[in-house]
Image (cartoon, rainbow, N blue to C red):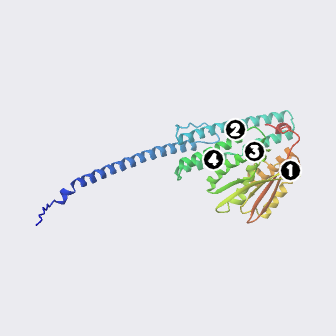
Amino acid sequence: MDWYTIYRVPTAVQFANITDIRDYSMAITISFLCITIIAAVVLIHFSTRRLLRLSSDIGKFSRDNTNIEMRVSGRDEVGKVAKSVKDMLREIDILLLETHQQKEREKELLNENYSKELLRREAEFKALQMQINPHFLYNTLEMIKGMVYSDDPQKNIITATQALADMFRYNIGGDYIATIRDELEHIRAYLIIQNFRFDKVITLCSSLPEDILDKPIVRFTLEPLVENAIVHGFLSAAGHNSIRIGHEARDGRLIISLSDDGAGIEPSILEEIKNRFKYEAAATASESRRSNIGLQNVHLRLKQFFGPEYGLQIESARGIGTTLYIVLPLEREKPYGDEGALGRV
């Protein structure tokens, strides 16, 4: 006969060690979770406070007050944004000073009875350099302030601020002539801001080869064309939109095409634009705020610099889109900048 020994052990005693381990693990987990939450709250509060302070500093900007003290510094992303804003405001000061000097120069030219045509063309170029006007700047800075409450405030603020700074750097460049490559980079920065402002997705697709990108073009040719696409084609259209840039060489001419897939231009407005292309007089500064007038001024500047056979052409169809053609010389015998003030102002 086999014998068996049976022990009866209370459950509390049997699982005592396991219960202790469980309670200890839970305590560590809860403590770690609390520390993590507290650290995250402190970090978010610190970052948000600095972003709000940066937003407050940007809000003090006005045309008469560009000397703003940025209270945020550091090597993190918020500090980089503050530095970009400070650099941008410094460039605004330079631009405003140049504008004031230009006005004084215009008075001197008038007093000395210099050529009115030279004065008009120099003043026109300077007016174009002021296309980033206070209204545009105010709206953009207000947009940047609002980004504090967006899903990814640091990334959005840095992207928008960098784009605006790039636009100003291009805007204060002194050369009347730029390369097509420079113009495209300027437009990319411009579209970044407009996409943020209007909460749209507008992509720029360029198929221009390297040798075409290095071709010269009158500075600020593309921005009014893109603005025309946004105003007449995209603001009334929902969803994703695109601007495609291509080229064609024909009969000694370089034809740059800029096509959009927007709503198209009303026939009456299209006819008005085509008629304005026939005018010889440039629009006034107040008129230039209308995008079709901006197209007319671009057309005239291209004609004045490259010759009467060059300039802009436009085609549009409702529901299909608009294409603008920039007609340039494929090669040019005369060196650029030999038209007096047009080479550099």
Tell me which label, 1 or 2, sits earlier in the chain: 2
The Cα–Cα distance between marks 2 and 3, rounded to whole angstroms, is 12 Å
The Cα–Cα distance between marks 4 and 2, rounded to whole angstroms, is 16 Å
Discs 3, 4 touching: Cβ within 8 Å = no
Residue 290 in view in this figure: no
- Please identify the quarter of the rendering in which residue 168 is found: top right
The Cα–Cα distance between marks 1 and 3, rounded to whole angstroms, is 26 Å
Mark drawn on residue 128: 3
Few, some or many C-alpha atoms within 10 Å of disc 3 (few <14, some 14-19, many ≥20)? many
- Amino acid, disc 3: Leu
Tell me which label, 3 or 4, sits earlier in the chain: 3
- Amino acid, disc 4: Tyr
Residue 226, x across and y down, in percent: 72, 53
In terms of depth relative to the viewer, which is nearer, 108 or 185? 185
Discs 2, 3 touching: Cβ within 8 Å = no
Discs 1, 4 touching: Cβ within 8 Å = no
Q: Which residue lies at the image location 79% right of the left edge and 64% below the top edge? A: 267
- Amino acid, disc 2: Leu
Discs 1, 2 touching: Cβ within 8 Å = no
Mark closer to the observer (1, 3): 1
- Amino acid, disc 1: Arg
The Cα–Cα distance between marks 3 and 4, rounded to whole angstroms, is 18 Å
Asked if residue 120 is positioned above or below residue 267 in the image, the reply reads above
Judging by the rendered image, the residue that carries numbered circle 1 is 253
Mark closer to the observer (1, 2): 1
Quarter of the image with the N terminus is: bottom left
Tell me which label, 4 or 2, sits earlier in the chain: 2
Few, some or many C-alpha atoms within 10 Å of disc 4 (few <14, some 14-19, many ≥20)? some
Judging by the rendered image, the residue that carries numbered circle 4 is 138
The Cα–Cα distance between marks 1 and 4, rounded to whole angstroms, is 40 Å
In terms of depth relative to the viewer, which is nearer, 199 or 292? 199
Judging by the rendered image, the residue that carries numbered circle 2 is 95
